[in-house]
Amino acid sequence: MTDQAAIAEQFDDLAQQREATEIGIWAFLATEVLFFGALLVCYAVYRYQYPAAFLAAAREANVVFGTVNAALLLTSSMTVALAVRMGRAGQARLSGHALLATVALGLGFLVVKAFEYTGDIQDGLFPGPGFRLAPPQTQIFWSLYWIMTGVHALHLIVGIGVLLTIFVLLRRSAFDPRHNTTVEVSCLYWHFVDIVWIFLYPLLYLPGRS
Amino acid sequence: MTDIAALPPTRAGLHGNYLSAGHTVASWLFTTDHKRIAILYIASTTLFFFIGGAAATLIRIELFTPDSGILTADGYNRVFTLHGVIMVFFFLVPVVPSTLGNFLLPLMIGARDVAFPKINLLSWYLSIAGGALALYSLLAGGIDTGWTFYTPYSSIYSNSFVTATAAGIFVAGFGSIATGLNFIVTIHTLRARGMTWFRLPLFVWSLYATSLIMLLATPVLAMTMVLIIAERVFGIGVFDPERGGDPILFQHLFWFYSHPAVYIMILPGMGIVTEIITCFARRRVFGYEFMVYALIGIAVIGFFVWGHHMFVSGQSGYASLVFSFLSFLVAVPSAIKVFNWTATLYRGEITFPAPMLYALGFVGLFTLGGLTGLFLASLPVDIHVTQTYFVVAHFHYIMVGGMVSALFGGLHFWWPKITGKLYSDSFARFAAVLMFLGFNFTFFPQFILGYLGMPRRYHAYPPEFQVWNVLSSAGAVILAAAYLMPLGYFAWSFLWGERAGSNPWDATGLEWQTASPPPEHNFEAPPQVPEVPYDYHPGRESARD
């Protein structure tokens, strides 16, 4: 495959194409920051208004599952960074293995999350008629818990799909990771999903435990 | 850098252009050519414009008489909500960036396409999917919350199709984020050699400022819509007062998007008007740098004024004070723009073809809309006129008087470039004057109604308000005629119009250096970038004489 074929027609050269995809992904992540930012604002406002209810509610979250998941995602950040490094070095095969490891860690997160969700529901922690905590403001915390973790999990599922696609493309030698930013751009997205969890974990699992 | 001329020549040769590049439906629906995507957007936004306009027609018919006429109170709620939702989210927000912006941005900076052509097409499909959801809720029975979706009415009590509409706005919002992202990356990376940041046409700068807002404000609205949907579908309660939820928080989140969205709806119009006024005054724009900083200033300050929608909501008095001050502040860059347009006209060789009439109409109507905005930024006056027709008149002067005038001006200005054909200037000038008169006829009475105390969003009103309402409804008939006229003469022009040539207005700007309609890859040879934009008298005129 020549370099020429890797350049889309709207670009003059590889450098320009690389610059465009990099600005593009950072701009997209800026959008994502504000997307989650709206939820963080809600959390901040309500925690300020109802500190006691938030501490009481957060004590009910399953801190073991939450911590295991934080460990899984942090490790996946390492494997995904390795995938980028190996790709740049021209080790397409190793890069693919690192991507697979990342996907496995992401799936592990989802499995743990599924157990956690099941436990939460059985425990009467879904807001609505069967909710077991008092005062009513604890429902605000748990509403935010479900939305925040749900939206985060959706992002993770998208990330797993993206990484799997790249893995298949690498296997077919559809692009050369030395000249192509596809791996890097997708990995930036994956890191972003991890960083969101680094914010969610202390906000949702740790309050009220000291 | 690869030489543009070294690329394979376009398929159809000398007479090949983007319109003749394919005639099948698939060649349109799967195109990644920014020019064809712009045409797709023109078709879809025109459809939404006339759907929203039909709702406005029903409103004006209902308000012709003081008592209940053709609509029930509930039906009236659904009609004005439909009008607001369709016009704001599916017409005004996307219309200029995605139609004229899409068509012209790569041409104006000397690029072959936008940075991500496939994402560009995806934007259109997202906007169509979102629009389809909104239209579904319209056909299924409509929504009655007002376009502002205030909770807890929208999240708990409203018995209408809020979920589908909110989902539609969510989906279409990602179309607008994708467009903004595409434009930002395109402007950063695909400028032709010699096209420095301070040689960019001001329309490009206005798209850049607009894209920043789209990128940073739209996701907040998207999440707010998610929270409403989650509250209706899953029964979670972030805004439910019974569980301690705060409806005012919803209003903050909603206006954090929806006020900057007002600038999404006006900044591109300002860009268009600058292109038109410089061309028909044959002058360099007065104070180019100030125009750039004013655009960016409006976009930035616009993020910090949302609280002026909530002066009577019960937010803290100190917050109102600060928001009031910042709202006055945003008037400064807006005024700079108006003064600079005026100064550009000074000692110009002014002619008055249709685009210029629309542009001058924009300046007048925008000024009136902007000055009445100061009334609303001032706390004591706002409390008197809040939720009255004064507010309705104010934002229609900006959005309809301003933005729609600019859109029509832009369509008339670049029509020869888009289609390669000329239209009847006398018909077009008649339509432009008719639009200006019809607009004032429709909306000026509403200032008076509002000042007299007529509240918005009611289907019936005391009889003493009737004369102003009749004036307004009569004006709407004229306005509707002015909107419909271009459909006729544009269609005529497209079918039987004279060939336009590459530069019928003798305008500067790279888009006029290529053929009309442009070839598939925009330029046959690398475009020449002039020293400064709007150089109408090269070597004779300095920027400020």
Image (spheres, coloured by chain):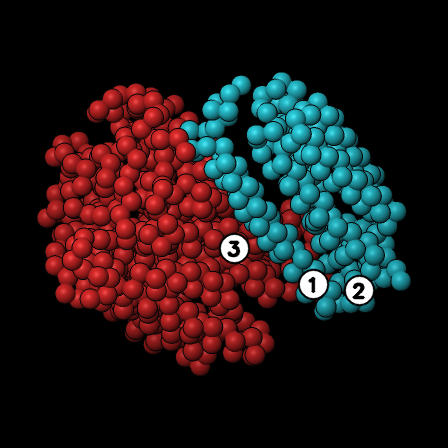
Q: Chain of mark 3?
A: B
Q: Quadrant of the C terminus of chain B?
A: bottom left
Name the residue located 67 percent from the left edge and 34 percent from the top edge. Answer: A84
Q: CA distance from mark 1 to mark 3?
A: 19 Å
Write down the quadrant of residue B274 in the picture.
bottom left
Q: Amino acid at mark 1?
A: Ala
Residue in the picture at 51% in, 78% down: B321
Q: Residue A53, labelled with which disc? A: 2
Q: Colour of chain A?
A: cyan
Residue B327, x across and y down, in percent: 44, 71
> Mark 3 — residue?
B217
Quadrant of the image occupied by residue B206: bottom left
Visual hue assigned to chain B: red
User: Whole-Å distance between the Cαs marked 2 and 1?
Assistant: 13 Å
> Which one is closest to the eye, mark 2 or mark 1?
1
Q: Quick one: label 1, few (<14), some, or many (20+) residues within 10 Å?
A: few
Q: For the residues marked 3 and 2, what is the alpha-carbon distance in whole angstroms?
A: 31 Å
Q: Which residue is mark 1?
A: A44
